[in-house]
Amino acid sequence: MTKRSYRSHQRRLAGVIEAIATGDTDARDILAAVTPGGGKSLLPVLAGTRLIAAGTVERICWVVPRDSLRLQAEEAFADPSWRATLGHSLSVRAADNTPDPSRGLDGYVTTYQGVAAAPDLHLKEFRRHRTLLVIDEMHHLPALAETDPTAAAQAARAEEDEASAWSRAILPLLECATVRLLLSGTLERADGRGILWLPYRKGPKARTREVELDAPGWAVIGYSRAQALAEKAVLPVTFGALDGEASWRDEEGVELGPHRLAGAYPEETTRPALFTALRTGFAEALLREAFLAVRDLRSRRREHRGLAPGVAARGLGKLLVVAPDQAAAKHYLEVIRRWIPPAQAEEVAQIATSDTPRAHEVLAAFRLRAEPSILVTVAMAYEGLDAPEVAVVAALTHIRSRPWLEQMVARATRVDPHAGPYADQRALVFHPDDPLFAQFRRRMETEQGTLAKRPKPRRSQDALPLWLRDQLPPPKEGITPLASNALAMRFDTLRPGPELAMRRPEQEEAQGEMLEPPSVAERRLRVRLGEMVAAQAVEDEAGRAGLRGGVAGPGLYHRYNACLKRVSGNKSRAQMTLAELQAAIGWMERNRLADHLHLLEDDARYAWSARQRSEWKPPVGRPDRRATSGAGRPASERSS
């Protein structure tokens, strides 16, 4: 078996892990900001192999954003060439929420949704074994008020969403993990919020924060697109921008247009024109361009290899079509199949959306087999899909946020080992030539993408129109697309983009011993306090039958967090001063939160579970352990 060589960011990670394993660094948080397609999937294997061999950790828990990525995580550990290179025999399994998720192996892979559905199960595993926690695509997890002062200040305005629920479930695992490896292809979120657990400092622009790349206790590994191109780890990208014009009827029945898609800057017609174009004749014209491009590519590669038409083979090139919604995806599939001989159409072109049967099987076939060679999807495959044979992307999506589009473009930038020399490969992305996509191109080429931006206060007179927002949602109900047509195509090659700015302590002059800065001390104490809360929750869940954690509402960890907040004068960890954090830790060292749950009895979120505990009686013949634990006693008998 041929051994592989490391890329630069993989070598740097190996050095950091070696320092952790030998005790040469106190860092326990590793942030790997790796450009999409740059090769993040090997990093957990590198880290787990050395840390388990050194006895630093006993298990690996790899958390991914979607179920379709769990198989790819398993494959990363099973890759025979990397097993030979690293000399490892580790295995992890794709686990569901049943006890003992590792099942005798070295760890398990789960999803954000899996952790959120059974947080106590995963927390127990982390308290039972020293664990390397790997969070994939970390940017999906927004910062929480419990740990981030800026998020705490915005908490009153924010609404709980699914992503926040994921963050709330994963936070205890972060606090209990022995070593944390956080992976992402971007360090900014489309909504401008901070990312869970990452350290921030004031940004260069007003109302912004940037990731603190040299924060104490952190090791940050950057791998930009410029570095990846220099090492031939990703392919250069050529964009085919198709201009067009569209007509539609507004909600009042007035016919508007035709209006051009292209322009120097967004206008009020940009949004409805794009919405119309993606659902009418323009979309079919762009699809046709992408289809012809991949057909010509496959024909050239067949001829070069001497393959007869119709012979299945790897490395010929594939087409990924990203649609704006499921209805459009089904229409696109019908259109494409009309261009393929009927005997081959169903096998060659397939669809994978959340409402189609066998979607995960179709994704796996698209990744691992010669056919299908065309896949139509909406969002299932835009991020994390490891399919190096994708050479052409038809970007028929209305979304214009930089992180989303970067991930989509990266589906075509992976080097295909079956497609011949690197110099003969190139990614080709067809897209509508609207000014919002051009804006994304400029940002990708000129900005590092490490900022979190606080939302500006909404003003009634001059609020930004929707068409200027990064995230471009569908227009209000009422618009009726009428017609659109393509006008002209232009091609541009994406420039490499900026390097990730790195200011590491070892690159600066040595200085005398300094006191710990207050912000660093606050962050360290918040983490310590979270670990203490999690430890008590796991201990009480396992040994105190009267608590019966998770009976209703939030799990025991979150009830304990709420209890600590009451004890601390209704201040969350993110709002506490340095002295208050120190006092809270001292209180936790002397007290059990289980003895103070009566403080939550007036809180509707916890009242039902508190009432259930007070009414619970032990089975016949079994002693009531609550009498000795202090939990569940009447408030008059408990110490305050």
Image (spheres, grey):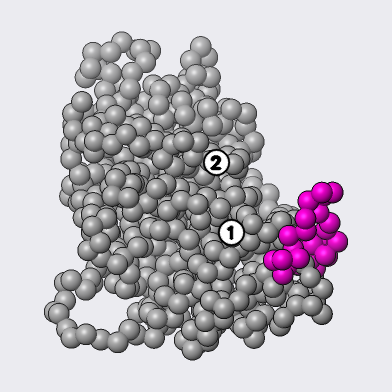
Viewer can see residue 408: no
**Count of picture labels:** 2
- Left or right of 277: which side holds 524? left
Residue at x-position 52% and y-position 14%: 342
Residue at position x 54%, y 32% in the image? 360
Kindly identify the residue that appears in the image at 53 percent across and 19 percent down.
Answer: 346
Q: Which mark is residue 100?
A: 2
Q: Which residue is mark 1?
A: 538
Q: CA distance from mark 2 to mark 1?
A: 15 Å
In the image, residue 275 sits, relative to residue 436, either above or below, namely above
Quarter of the image that includes the C terminus: bottom right
Of residues 597 and 331, the one nearer the viewer is: 597
Residue visible at 43% across and 36% down in the picture: 105
In-front residue for pair 176/214:
176
Q: Amino acid at mark 1?
A: Val
Q: Which residues are magenta?
A: 605-631
Mark 1 residue element = helix
